[in-house]
Amino acid sequence: MEPEETTTVERELAFSEMEGSELFKPISSLRASQRLRLAAKVMPLAETGDDLTAEDIACFADLMDYLEDGGFITDLEGWGKFFDEKGLQGAMKLAMTYAGEAIGVRL
């Protein structure tokens, strides 16, 4: 009798389970208009792959400005430290997951 093969399926973490989620305003406290504007900011980044272009980085910088200046990020100092530790990819994943969940989509 051969041993059974097991497969591991990686589950995407919910935003609230992600490291750094405590830096953001709770999604439940966002107005519908804030959620839609957030979706509009993140849409250009939805098809971004691992190879970022200058345009992708500029779009993400606009999203970061919107999150920081709009009060979505409640701990700006912690956000800066998170970015220093996790880099662009980590910050993008966290921000995109926040935006996706804000509009009811898992990214």
Image (cartoon, grey):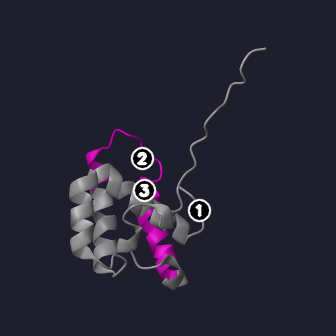
78 relative to 89, above or below: below
Asked which quadrant contains residue 22, the reply is: bottom left
Q: Nearer the viewer, mark 3 or mark 1?
A: 1
**Magenta span includes 55:** yes
Q: Which residues are magenta?
A: 33-57
50 relative to 33, above or below: above
| Residue at numbered disc 1 | 105
40 relative to 13, above or below: below
Q: Residue at position x 36%, y 56% from top? A: 92
Q: Nearer the viewer, residue 79 or 59?
A: 79
**Alpha carbon distance from label 2 to label 3:** 8 Å
What amino acid type should be assigned to the residue bearing mark 3?
Answer: Pro
| Residue at numbered disc 2 | 48
In which quadrant is the N terminus drawn? top right
**Element type where label 1 sits in the image:** loop
| Residue at numbered disc 3 | 44
